[in-house]
Image: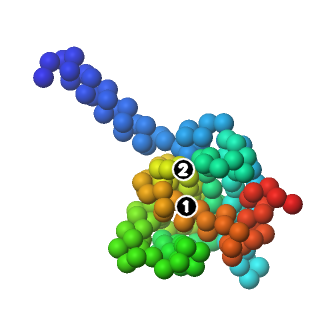
Amino acid sequence: MNARALSCVLALGLCLTSGMAAASWRQALPEARLQGAGEMRFLGLRIYSAQLWSQAPLAAPGQPFALELIYHRSISRQALVRTSLEEITRLAGELAPERRARWEREMRLAFVDVEPGRRIAGLYLPGTGARFYVDERLRHEIRDPAFAEAFFAIWLDPRTRAPDLRRQLLGLP
C-alpha cells in the first residue's frame, strides 16, 4: 500500500472512530428545542427527570426527537429492560417470541445499570429506528422502526402509565 492510500485509510478510520466516540444526540438534532420536561415519581419517590427535545413541534408527524432521562435512583440494566418490555407489550400487544427476544437483546446492548445523575437519551429516527446515548456518548443503535415506535410509546402514547408526564413532555396544558 502506498503512503497516500495508507494515509486515506488512517484518516477514514480516525473519522469513523472519533465520530462514534464523540457523537451526541445533540449533534444529530442541532436545532432541537426543549418541548417539555417533567418527573417520573413512584410512591412519591423521584425516579428520573425527563426532557423531550425536537427541531419541530411533535404534532408534525415523522419528526425526529430525543427523550433524555436523568436518573435519581439506582436501577439495574435488567430492570430497565424488563420494565420496557412489559410496557411495550402492554401497549402494543403480545410480541412474537423471536421479535421479543431480538428487542430484549438490543435493549441489553443499549442500556446500562444507572446510578443517580446518569443520563440516557433515546433518539427517535422515523423510518429508521433509535439510537441510545449514555452520558452524551453513543451506546447502541437499533435499526428497527417498529421497535422505535413501540419503545417511545411508553412515554408518548395516550395510554401511557404516566399521563401527567406525557402531558408535560408534550408541552400540553
Looking at the picture, the colour scheme in use is rainbow
Image quadrant containing the N terminus: top left
- Most extreme residue toward the bottom is 43
Q: 141 or 60, which is in the foreground?
A: 60
- The numbered dot on residue 81 is none
Determine the residue positioned at 73% across, 65% down. Answer: 166
For residue 149, side relative to residue 45 (left or right): left
Q: 42 or 152, which is in the foreground?
A: 152
In this picture, is 100 found above or below 136? below
Please give the residue where the numbered disc 2 appears in the rendered image.
126
* Amino acid at circle 2: Pro
In this picture, is 78 found above or below 27? below
- Most extreme residue toward the right is 173
Image quadrant containing the C terminus: bottom right
* Amino acid at circle 1: Glu
For residue 106, side relative to residue 113 (left or right): left
Determine the residue positioned at 52% across, 59% down. Answer: 148
Look at the numbered disc 2 and give the secondary structure of its residue: loop
Q: To which quarter of the image does residue 56 belong?
A: top right
For residue 103, side relative to residue 161 (left or right): left
- The numbered dot on residue 149 is 1
User: Decide: marks 2, 1 in contact (CB < 8 A)?
Assistant: no
Look at the numbered disc 1 and give the secondary structure of its residue: helix
